[in-house]
Image (cartoon, rainbow, N blue to C red):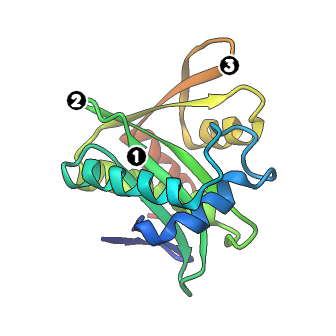
Amino acid sequence: MKLEYKTIHLRLVEPNDADFILKLRLDNRYNQFLSSVSPSVDAQKKWIENYKQDERIGKEFYFIIERLDGVPCGTVRIYDLREDSFCWGSWILNEDKTRYAALESAFLVYQFAFDILGFKKSHFDVRKGNQKVVAFHTKMGAIQVDEDDDNYYFEITEDAVNNTKVNLNLV
């Protein structure tokens, strides 16, 4: 499965992506707001192999973000699938990303979840202090619905995402 926009595409992760994912997750430029992981490539491969079982039953989806020339530049996951809502995260983009990779990858996540999986909204959390991501989601139309000591909790609807596309002349 491949989802494509103007400068990037998403493809489902495979065990041979373990080294790339581990480098992203261990890089201090990108991991400030992520949970820690084992520094073992073998452990990462095993995690991916276990995840692939959840993918097969439609429980969660983990994507590699690639430029159209095939250079990997990030990751994103869809998980915590509920009746009408899904969560997404593990969103990392490295220095190889395209100028619009953040916006395009978000739209591709929403396209997959709304159009293919049939959800109507998304719920997600953003760590406090991660102001760039908070601002990004707010500009996309997300509404903060709660917070705790560590996180802000958001929801965004399919209509809000579609309105953002219209406002950006991307329809």
**Snapshot quadrant of residue 52:** bottom left
Q: CA distance from mark 2 to mark 3?
A: 26 Å
- Look at 65% across and 66% down and name the residue there: 100
Q: CA distance from mark 1 to mark 2?
A: 14 Å
In this rendering, does residue 10 appear at all? Answer: no
Q: Is residue 103 above or below residue 118?
A: below
Callout 1 secondary element: strand
Q: Is residue 125 above or below residue 53?
A: above
Pick the front one: 107 or 96: 96
- Find residue 150 and name its label: 3
- Look at 68% across and 41% down and name the residue there: 133
- Find residue 78 and name its label: 1
Q: CA distance from mark 1 to mark 3?
A: 21 Å
**Snapshot quadrant of residue 93:** bottom right
Residue type of the residue flagged with mark 1 = Ile
Question: Of marks 1 and 2, which one's residue comes earlier in the chain?
Answer: 1
Callout 2 secondary element: loop
Q: Seen in the image, is 54 located left or right of residue 123?
A: left
Considering the image in quadrants, where does the N terminus appear? bottom left
Q: Is residue 122 above or below residue 15?
A: above
Residue 156's x, y, as percent?
Answer: 46, 34
Crowding at label 2, few (<14), some or many (≥20) Cα neighbours within 10 Å? Answer: few
Crowding at label 3, few (<14), some or many (≥20) Cα neighbours within 10 Å? Answer: few
- Look at 52% across and 64% down and name the residue there: 18
Question: Of marks 2 and 3, which one's residue comes earlier in the chain?
Answer: 2
Residue type of the residue flagged with mark 2 = Glu
Tell which tag, 2 or 3, sits nearer the viewer. Answer: 3
Which residue lies under the disc numbered 2? 83
Residue 132's x, y, as percent?
Answer: 75, 42
- Look at 54% across and 74% down and name the residue there: 66
